[in-house]
Amino acid sequence: MKKTLTLLAVVLATAATSFAGEAVSSKKVVVAPVQDNLFRAGEVQLDVFVAGAAGRFNGKNANGLGGGLGLSYFFTRYFGIGVDDTLGGLSSARGKVFDNLQGNLIARYPIESWHLAPYAIAGGGATWGNNKAQGNGNVGGGLEYRINRAVGLFVDSRYIYGNKGLNESLSRAGVRFVF
């Protein structure tokens, strides 16, 4: 009986060490946190901004201040589409307003370490003001500073042109909410 118990104890001791797991090392393992990209594919952005327009529309000065809203969607980190509407008062005509609705293609180049993304825009839309409306095209660029993944600040400017004397710039500065 003593031989059987001794044999059983040796077998259990051997089996216990085989299930003990891995050897423990005195070296510390450092795990670097995964960096979340501030600028991502699939972003939906809501812009709230102030704007200033300067130039000519239908042969008249079309300078004014206002504000607006924009909505953008980025297919990739680098390319997206957007639409924005700017509404403001014309300084040359008391009580008159301008409205500028634009659809754009957007190309950006994120620099994650600086939280910046310079971008270029090109598109078209329509401008209303001085009791006239006109289709137009636009080209421009801007810069976005991303505070975190959900909020950014931006500034941009675009040249708006048309064939009926539309020749103006529209500059915007605002807050961008990212979803």
Image (tube, grey):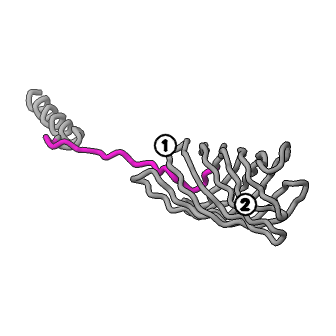
Q: Nearer the viewer, residue 46 or 68?
A: 68
Check disc 2 and report its element: helix, strand or loop.
Answer: strand
Check disc 1 and report its element: helix, strand or loop.
Answer: loop
Q: How many marks?
A: 2
Per the rendered image, the range of residues in magenta is: 25-44
The span from disc 2 to disc 1 (Cα, nearest Å) is: 33 Å
Q: Quadrant of the C terminus?
A: top right
User: Amino acid under label 2?
Assistant: Gly
Residue 176 place in picture, x, y as percent: 60, 45
Residue 39 place in picture, x, y as percent: 52, 53
Q: Are marks 2 and 1 in contact (CB under 8 Å)?
A: no
Query: Quadrant of the rendered structure where residue 133 is?
Result: bottom right
Query: Quadrant of the rendered structure where residue 132 is?
Result: bottom right
Residue 87 place in picture, x, y as percent: 77, 47
Residue 103 place in picture, x, y as percent: 74, 60
* Residue at image point 68% right, 50% down: 52
The residue positioned farthest toward the bottom in the image shown: 163
* Residue at image point 82% right, 47% down: 97
* Residue at image point 70% right, 49% down: 70
* Residue at image point 65% right, 44% down: 49
Disc ID at residue 55: 2
Judge whether 43 appears above or below 138 on screen.
above
**Circle 1 sits on which residue?**
147
- Main SS category, magenta section: loop
Q: Nearer the viewer, residue 151 or 76?
A: 151
In-image side of 163 versus 72 (left or right):
right
Query: Quadrant of the rendered structure where residue 9 is?
Result: top left
In-image side of 33 versus 145 (left or right):
left
User: Amino acid under label 1?
Assistant: Ile
Residue 55 is one of the magenta-drawn residues: no
Q: Quadrant of the N terminus?
A: top left
Residue 27 is one of the magenta-drawn residues: yes
